Amino acid sequence: MSIPAETARTVPPDARPEPQGVTLRGLRKTYGTAVAVGGVDLDIEAGRFAAILGPSGCGKSTVLGMIGGFVEPTGGEILIGGRPIVGVPPERRPTAMVFQTLALFPHLTVAGNVAFGLRVRGVRGNAVAERVRELLDLVQLGPLAGRRISELSGGQQQRVAIARALAVEPAVLLLDEPLSALDAQLRKQMQIELRSIQQRTATTFVYVTHDQQEAMSMADQVVVMREGAVEQSGSPLEVYTRPRTEFVARFLGDANVISSASASASASGSGMALGSGTASVSRLGESAAIVRWLRTEVPATGGRWAIRPEAVTLTDDPGDTAPIRGTVVRSTYYGATVRYEVEVGLEEPLVVVVAGEHIPWPVGAVVGVGLDPRRVVPLQDGPA
Amino acid sequence: MTTRTTARPVRTGRRKAGRARWLPGALMTPPLLLFGALLLAVVLFVYRAFAPGTTGESGVVEAVGAGALDLFYWEAMLRTVLVSLGASALSCLISLLVASALVAVDRRSVTAVTMALLFSPLVVSMAVRGYGWLLILDQPPVAHSLDAAGSLLGFLGVSSGLLATVVVLAHAMMPITAFPLIARMREIHGLQVNRAARDLGAGSSRVFWRVTVPLAAPAALRVGALAFGLSMGAFGIPAIIGRGRVQMVSELVYQNLLAVNWPTAFVRLAVLLLVTAVVVTPLFTLAKRLGRQAAPRRERSA
C-alpha cells in the first residue's frame, strides 16, 4: 500500500523524530559527457552540522539536490537513517530544504509560510497555530507573524525560511547557501543564529557554501569538494590543520606549499615550488636548508608540505645560528596581526603571520625562520 | 585672480541641442495624427448621434424612446457578457496550463512549437479560422458533446452554439493571454517556490492551486480583463460559429450602422462600453491588490 504523499511525513505533535544520519555511496551525476558529481562517498552523523564546501561548479549543490530529491542521481546510493531514498520524490523524503533564493511564498504572511508544510500534511486548527508560534519564537520572529514577506528584511526572511523548513520536522535539513545574499555583518549574525538553532533542535544540518569561514565557524564536519569529488572530510580543526591535499590547504585559508620534487626536477636539483607555481631557487644554500630541514623533520612520500602562515615563527638572528634564515621583503600591518613575506630562497617568499604586539621587523631584516614539525603537513597529492 | 567653477554642462553645439528638442516631437507625430483621426471620428459619431431627430429632440433620446435598450438588447448584452467571460476565463486557464507545462518541460524545441501554435490565431485570418472550426465542430463526437453540454446548461440559457462560440473565441484570445502568463510562470519558476512547496510535502495539484495560481493570479486577472474587453467587441467569430443564433451586441450595433441609425448605434455602444468598464475595473483593481501582496521579496538590510 502506498503512503499518500502529503501524509508521509506527518508526525504526531508529541513525538519529535530522531535526527538521522546521511550516507552517500558512490553517488554520481552526469549530464551527457559532463560529470557534475563523480562517485561521492560520505558519512554525516545524525544531529551533526555538516558543511559541504567548495568552489563554484564543484558539484556541492548537485549533491544537496540529490539528497533533497530534486536531482536524479546517475548512480550510487543515498541513505537517510539507513534507508535508501533514491527514487523517492522530494515530498516523501524526510528532508526539508532552505533554498539559496529562500523561495518564500510572497502571497502568504510569515505565519502562512511557516504553516504551509503543516497544512499540506493535514494538521489543522490549534495544532498549526501552536507549532507556528513555537517556531517563530525559536527564530525570534513572533511579533512579525502577520507581516507579508515583502515587509521583512533579508535576515528576517532568512529566518522565516528556516522556520518553514523546520515546521515539517525533517530528519535532515538541507541548506543551499542561504546566507549568500546577505551583507557581511548580517551574515555573521545569522551564522551564530543558525548554529544555535541547529543545537537547540538537534536536527542534522547539511549546509552548502563556498565561504570557508562560514563553514569553519558553524560546522561540526567540513566536507571539501573539488571537481565533483570529496577531497577531504573531517572536523574543521582537522581539515584546517591537517589538510590532505594542496587544494584543501589552499582552499581553507592561506598556506605555503613547498615541493621538494619540483626542486630536484628543476635547475639540477635546485628548484622548489611555493604555492601553485614551480620556482627556481635563487639562493641555493638557504633553499637547500629549508628543504633539508623538511625532509629530515617531516618526511613526506610525495615530497610536498603545507605550512600555515601562523605556524611559522620569526626570530632575531644576530648570531647567524638559525638552521633556516630569511630576509623580510614585505610587511603589512593588520592591527591584530602583521603579515610578513620572507625570502627563504624560493621564487616566491614564505608568508608568515605574526600575532600580538611586537617590534616589527623592517624590510631587509635578516630573521631566523622557526618551523614546528607538528605544524608542518605532508601533502598526499600533486599540485592543485 | 580668482577662478570660478560651474556645475553647468558645457554645450558642445547648438545644432545638436536643437535636434534633441524637435526629434521627440517628430517621432510622436504619426501616432498623434492616427489618434487624432480616431478622436475626430468619435466626435463626428457623437455629433451625428446627438443631432436632432424627426421629433426635434436629440437623436439619442429618441433612440432610447424607440427601444434601443429593449429586452432584446439586454438579452444580447447578457449573451455577450457570458460569452466574453467564458472565453476570457477559458483562455486564461488554458494559458496557465500551457505555461506550467512549458516551464516544467523546459525544452527549446517544445517551447518554439508551442509559441508558434499560440501565435497562429494572429496570422491566420478570422474567416479561415472560423470556418475551420466549423468543420471540427460539425464532427459527430464534438457536435454531440456540445449538444449534451448545451442541454445540461440549458436552464441558464446556454446553448451548444454559445458554448462553441466560447471555445473558438478563447482560441482567438490565446495570443493575448498566453504570452504574458508564460513570462509570469517563468518568473515564478525562477523564485523556486514550486520546488519549495513540493519539498514541504505538497503534491502537484496542491502546488498548482495553492502556489502557482495565487502567484499568477494578478497577471491572469490583467490579461483576462484584456481578453474580456476584446471579446465584448467580438463580432465575426460569434456570427460564424453561432450561425446567426448567437447574436452579440456588436452585431446589433453593426446592423444599426448599416441602417445609418447613428443614435441607436451610439446608445448601444455606450452601454456596451459601460458594462465592459464595470466588469474590467474591479478585475484590474483586484489584480493590483493581489500583485502588491504577491510581490517578490525585497532585499533590505536589517
Image: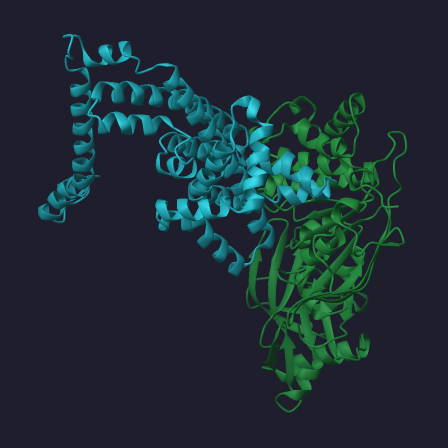
Chain colours: A green, B cyan
Quadrant the N terminus of chain B occupies:
top left
Q: Is residue B149 above or below residue A329?
A: above
Q: Is residue A119 above or below residue B108?
A: above
Is residue A75 toward the left or the right of residue B94 in the image? Answer: right
> In which quadrant of the rendered image does the C terminus of chain B lie?
top right
Asked if residue B180 is positioned above or below residue B59 in the image, the reply reads below
In the rendered image, the residue lying farthest to the bottom is A268
Residue in the picture at 61% in, 79% down: A278
Residue B296 visible (yes or no): no
Residue B211 seen in the current view: yes
Residue nearest the viewer, comparing A227 with B281:
B281
Residue drawn at x 71%, y 62% is A225
- Which picture quadrant has residue A309? bottom right
Q: How far from the left and from the top, in percent, is residue B281? A: 42, 23
In front here: A110 or A9? A9
Residue B83 locus on image (x, y percent): 46, 30
Location of residue B184 in the rendering, given as x and y in whole percent from the top left corner: 50, 42
Please state the horizontal and vertical placement of residue A339, each as a whole percent of the image.
61, 59
Q: Is residue A88 left or right of residue A327?
A: right
Q: Which residue occupies the foreground of this view, A274 or B33?
A: B33
Question: As displayed, is residue A235 above or below residue B7?
Answer: below
**Is B104 on the left-hand or right-hand side of A114?**
left
